[in-house]
Image (cartoon, rainbow, N blue to C red):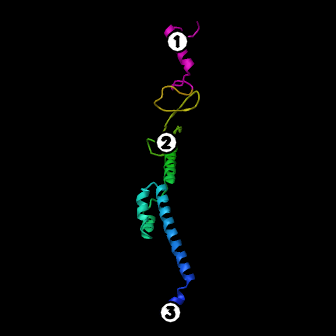
Amino acid sequence: MSELLSQFWTEQMQTALNVVVVLLIILYILSIVWVVRDAYLRGTLWYIWGIVALVPILGLIAYCMLRPPLLSVDRDEQELEIALKQRQLMKYGECATCGYPVEADFVLCPNCHTQLKNLCSHCQHALDPAWQVCPYCATPVGGVPRSSASSALRRRRTGNPTGQA
């Protein structure tokens, strides 16, 4: 048996075995480096995962099973996208009567036809029902332009109904 083993265990086999062992050690070290780097990029405690990865094969498998699903960069980008979508949705509201989604400048609800806003008689911008003056053209919501309203007020104060001096 030893004669058969000595014929099989040649110097080329020893060299091949040494190469395989060196490659396995390099692969083991690279797996530890990958776990530490990946854990760092995912925002976890990378040094703890580095210690776990020191356990051959099982440490790598444990990390692959328990690691966070997203990289920190991807998670931040996803949070920004959600914030952007929420900001875009802020320009929409709901009809107070039926709850149908309406845009901020809708005058009527497209679903139940409830009047949501008034229109300025001068510039035709949508106005909030609580507003007393149009912020776009300074026309009172009653429909009289501001210059006419101020001249009518002056006429009332002076007692001159025609407005002539």
What segment carries the magenta color? 137-165
Q: Between 119 and 103, which is closer to the camera in this rendering?
A: 103
Element type where label 1 sits in the image: helix
Element type where label 3 sits in the image: helix
The first of marks 1 and 2 along the sequence is 2
Element type where label 2 sits in the image: loop
The first of marks 2 and 3 along the sequence is 3
Alpha-carbon neighbours of circle 2 within 10 Å: few (<14), some, or many (≥20)?
Answer: few
The image quadrant of residue 96 is: top left
Q: On the image, numbered disc 2 is attached to which residue?
A: 90
Give the residue at x 54% y 90%. 7
Alpha-carbon neighbours of circle 1 within 10 Å: few (<14), some, or many (≥20)?
Answer: some
The first of marks 1 and 3 along the sequence is 3
Position of residue 36 measured from the top left corner of the image (x, y, whole percent): 47, 59
- Of the two numbered discs 1 and 3 in the rendering, the one whose residue sits closer to the viewer: 3
Give the residue at x 44% y 68%. 61
